Image: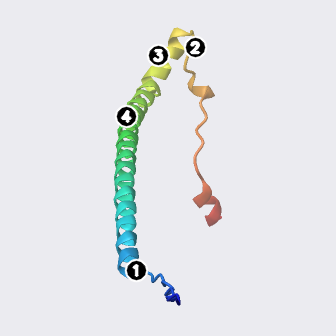
């Protein structure tokens, strides 16, 4: 008796493009959602930092204005005269020298 030999067909694996496309779609969707959540949280933290810096800046501006007012009050002529009088100093008119800006007068000569 003769044996019947059947030829084995080579099974070619074909690339299932639909499966690859679906897999790539899910991977890209996952990466998009992950990155959008990260960026949203990062944006919120940056916004909080900006608000904190603006608050500090406003406080420093208020402090600067208060210091400017204090400088103006401390440097008044009356206060300087009062402190000099308390220290025993006197105002002698013959020792006062006035210096003026004569740059215009020199240009005319």
Query: Helix, strand, or loop for circle 4?
Result: helix
Circle nearer the viewer, 3 or 4: 4
Which residue does the numbered mark 4 point to in the structure image? 59
Q: Position of residue 51 (x, y in %)?
A: 34, 43
Image quadrant in which you'd find residue 90: top right
- Disc tally is 4
SS of the residue under disc 2: loop
Disc 4 crowd, CA 10 A, few/some/many (<14, 14-19, 20+): few
- Residue 9, relative to residue 58: is it above or below? below
In the displayed structure, 40 sits above or below 25; it is above
In-image side of 59 versus 86 (left or right): left
Q: Secondary structure at mark 3?
A: helix
The CA distance from mark 4 to mark 1 is: 65 Å
Indicate which disc, 4 or 1, sits on the residue closer to the N terminus: 1
Q: Which residue is mark 1?
A: 16
Q: Up-down: is 101 above or below 61?
A: below
């Amino acid at each position: 008796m003769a044996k019947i030999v059947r030829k084995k067909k080579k099974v070619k694996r074909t690339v299932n493009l639909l499966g690859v496309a679906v897999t790539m779609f899910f991977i890209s969707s996952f990466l998009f959602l992950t990155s959008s959540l990260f960026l949203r949280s990062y944006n919120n933290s940056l916004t909080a930092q900006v608000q904190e810096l603006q608050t500090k800046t406003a406080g420093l501006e208020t402090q600067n204005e208060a210091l400017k007012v204090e400088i103006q009050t401390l440097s008044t002529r009356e206060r300087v005269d009062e402190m000099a009088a308390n220290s025993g100093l006197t105002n002698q008119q013959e020792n006062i020298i006035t210096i003026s800006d004569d740059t215009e007068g020199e240009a005319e000569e």
